[in-house]
Image (cartoon, rainbow, N blue to C red):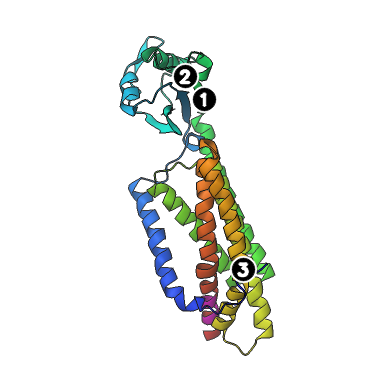
């Protein structure tokens, strides 16, 4: 199926503008990461406890903070008003992320929940089981281990991709693909930092999915370039790359559009649990499609011209 029958777009003539746009997006993200002292990590990586509760009426964050400024647990008073507290989904749902406490007892979490229910006795569901939505606890050691594993997973994926494309195509194709994939991950990470979204294990899974999706698009174009180089030896390399992208553009649009529609529906109607994963995928589909055309391919042209001049 071809939505676009035949195009003759000069994509490579736009490569300077695309490089400027990519650098702007990357440095904006890096600037945000520097200002925020790195990405905002979930308890999966930092360790701590996440308590999500549901009230019968909308609650203000300041109300919750005031209630948590003096929580008595096992004869000790804890000030939890400075912990991260936010709404999720409805205004009646409140998530509280507690950092590990030095003298945290065995009943610490239950005591915090009891304190909240006692502070707002008329605003909790009749069935106390409906008050608690979820409780997640991760130790600092486990969080550090998960962080290391996440970085290793992404690094290993990029290294194996570099090896695979070097064998199947040429080393310059591999470099172009790796730079495009790093481009996709950095921009997505930067957008999460700018929007103050958390990086959790599900987002790492989204990053790896983005890497695979973007690579698939890039390899299709690279395969076309290789075939056209063999059949059009007299044509200039830039013309061959433009022709290859134009031949692939219909397939790229169909794949990207259908994938985007699916993840958009997940983002809009999938609920709070999958919301950020779907958002990361939406960004990844857009950035991945863009990088296959305007990052990976122009880099191959640039590296090829450098190779020819030697």
Q: Is residue 61 left or right of residue 43?
A: left
Over which residues does the magenta segment extend?
301-305
Question: Which residue is painted at 51% across and 44% down in the image?
Answer: 268
Question: Which residue is painted at 51% across and 64% down in the image?
Answer: 290
Considering only order in the chain, which callout, 3 or 2, is on the residue closer to the N terminus?
Answer: 3
Q: Which residue is mark 1?
A: 135
Front position in the image: 308 or 259: 259
Q: Residues within 10 Å of mark 2 (few under 14, many from 20)?
A: some
Q: Are marks 1 and 3 in contact (CB under 8 Å)?
A: no
Separation of marks 2 and 3 at Cα, in angstroms: 56 Å
Q: Is residue 250 left or right of residue 96?
A: right
Q: Main structural element of the magenta stretch: helix, strand or loop? A: helix
| The furthest residue to the top | 75
Q: Which residue is mark 3?
A: 3
Considering only order in the chain, which callout, 3 or 1, is on the residue closer to the N terminus?
Answer: 3
Q: Nearer the viewer, mark 1 or mark 3?
A: 3
State which quadrant residue 30 falls in: bottom left
Considering only order in the chain, which callout, 1 or 2, is on the residue closer to the N terminus?
Answer: 2
Separation of marks 1 and 3 at Cα, in angstroms: 48 Å
Residue 269 lies, with reference to residue 50, above or below; the image says below
Q: Position of residue 209 (x, y in %)?
A: 59, 51
Q: Are marks 2 and 1 in contact (CB under 8 Å)?
A: yes
Question: Which residue is painted at 52% across and 85% down in the image?
Answer: 309
Separation of marks 2 and 1 at Cα, in angstroms: 9 Å
């Amino acid at each position: 199926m071809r939505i676009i029958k035949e195009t003759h777009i000069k994509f490579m003539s736009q490569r300077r503008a695309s490089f400027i746009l990519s650098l702007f997006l990357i440095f904006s993200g890096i600037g945000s990461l520097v200002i925020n002292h790195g990405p905002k990590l979930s308890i999966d990586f930092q360790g701590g406890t996440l308590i999500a509760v549901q009230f019968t009426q909308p609650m203000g964050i300041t109300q919750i903070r005031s209630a948590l400024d003096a929580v008595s647990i096992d004869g000790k008073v804890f000030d939890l008003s400075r912990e991260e507290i936010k709404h999720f989904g409805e205004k009646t749902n409140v998530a509280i992320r507690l950092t590990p406490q030095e003298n945290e007892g065995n009943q610490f979490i239950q005591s915090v929940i009891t304190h909240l229910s006692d502070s707002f006795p008329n605003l909790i569901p009749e069935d106390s089981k409906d008050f608690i939505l979820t409780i997640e606890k991760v130790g600092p050691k486990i969080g550090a281990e998960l962080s290391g594993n996440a970085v290793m997973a992404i690094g290993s994926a990029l290294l194996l991709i570099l090896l695979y494309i070097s064998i199947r195509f040429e080393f310059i194709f591999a470099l172009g693909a790796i730079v495009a994939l790093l481009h996709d991950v950095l921009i997505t990470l930067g957008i999460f930092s700018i929007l103050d979204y958390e990086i959790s294990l599900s987002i790492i899974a989204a990053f790896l999915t983005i890497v695979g999706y973007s690579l698939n698009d890039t390899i299709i174009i690279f395969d076309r370039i290789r075939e056209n180089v063999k059949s059009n030896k007299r044509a200039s390399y830039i013309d061959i790359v433009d022709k290859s992208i134009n031949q692939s553009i219909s397939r790229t649009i169909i794949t990207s559009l259908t994938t985007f529609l699916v993840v958009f529906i997940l983002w809009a109607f999938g609920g709070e649990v999958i919301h950020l994963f779907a958002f990361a995928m939406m960004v990844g589909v857009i950035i991945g499609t863009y990088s296959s055309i305007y990052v990976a391919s122009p880099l191959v042209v640039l590296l090829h011209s450098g190779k020819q001049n030697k």
